[in-house]
């Protein structure tokens, strides 16, 4: 969409679309095309966007949404922790398997069954074990109590406050898509001093 609210604005009188009618003004398209709607006022694009962003920020700060964010954040962290535990367990199994194979080679050598290929295989297994130990150190499991951010609600509040500034950020299209995804529709109801 060219503008933040394009296609999301509806006339509160007739249900028609509010569309751009001049450079930066929205108005009821039914009134403009057919003249059958009594919603005459138009509104500037900047004014309606500002009003919607303020309303959106107010709604997003509702206690149930804040607690929903915190719960979702903590659930995502728990899922990440479970994935990390599963990966760690699999890594430990692989290390145990490699140790078993190395022990098997040493046992065969002790029993007098040495072959030159065993030396190469032993070097491969040791290299795999070193690599796994290195990966294991990189993937040490963080403590879940550290991950569950005690200020998650504050992080959410700051994110909501920055909604408007994200439109002027590095990726305004992505920010616009994000904000548009939070809006079902905006209904403009006429009043004496404008919509």
Image: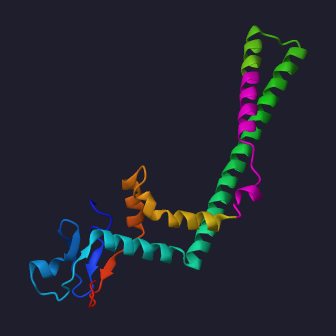
Q: What residue is shown at x 14% (from left), y 82% (from top)?
A: 31
Q: Give the image quarter of residue 101.
A: top right
**Towards the viewer: 95 or 150:** 150
Q: Give the image quarter of residue 150.
A: bottom right
Q: Quadrant of the N terminus?
A: bottom left
Q: In this picture, is 101 found above or below 16?
A: above
From the viewer's perspective, tell me whether residue 10 is left or right of residue 125.
left
Farthest residue, direction left: 34
Farthest residue, direction front: 193
Farthest residue, direction bottom: 192
Q: What residue is shown at x 73% (from left), y 32% (from top)?
A: 134
**Towards the viewer: 164 or 102:** 164
Farthest residue, direction right: 110
Magenta stretch, overall SS: helix
Q: Give the image quarter of residue 6.
A: bottom left
Q: Quadrant of the C terminus?
A: bottom left
Q: What residue is shown at x 20% (from left), y 77% (from top)?
A: 27
From the viewer's perspective, tell me whether residue 36 is left or right of residue 103.
left
Please report the bounds of the magenta region as a residue range.
125-150
Q: What residue is shown at x 29% (from left), y 63% (from top)?
A: 3
Task: Tell me residue 154's x, y (percent).
Answer: 63, 66
**Towards the viewer: 158 or 33:** 158
Q: In this picture, is 153 found above or below 169?
A: below
Task: Tell me residue 125's x, y (percent).
Answer: 74, 23
Task: Tell me residue 9's x, y (percent).
Answer: 28, 75
**Towards the viewer: 19 or 169:** 169
What color scheme is it? rainbow
143 in magenta: yes
136 in magenta: yes
Q: In this picture, is 14 found above or below 153?
A: below
Task: Tell me residue 115's x, y (percent).
Answer: 78, 10
From the viewer's perspective, tell me whether residue 34 is left or right of residue 85.
left
């Amino acid at each position: 969409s060219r503008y933040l609210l394009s296609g999301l604005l509806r006339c509160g009188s007739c249900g028609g679309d509010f569309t751009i009618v001049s450079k930066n003004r929205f108005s009821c398209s039914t009134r403009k095309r057919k003249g059958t709607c009594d919603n005459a006022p138009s509104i500037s694009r900047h004014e309606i966007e500002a009003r919607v962003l303020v309303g959106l920020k107010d709604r997003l700060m509702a206690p149930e949404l804040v607690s929903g964010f915190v719960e979702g954040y903590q659930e995502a962290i728990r899922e990440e922790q479970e994935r990390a535990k599963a990966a760690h367990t699999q890594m430990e199994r692989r290390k145990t398997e490699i140790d078993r194979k190395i022990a098997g080679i040493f046992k065969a050598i002790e029993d007098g069954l040495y072959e030159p290929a065993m030396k190469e295989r032993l070097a491969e297994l040791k290299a795999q074990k070193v690599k796994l130990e290195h990966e294991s150190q990189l993937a040490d499991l963080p403590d879940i109590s550290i991950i569950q951010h005690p200020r998650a609600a504050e992080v959410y509040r700051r994110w909501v406050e920055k909604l408007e500034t994200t439109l002027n950020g590095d990726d305004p299209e992505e920010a616009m898509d994000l904000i548009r995804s939070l809006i079902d529709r905006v209904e403009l109801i006429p009043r004496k001093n404008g919509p």
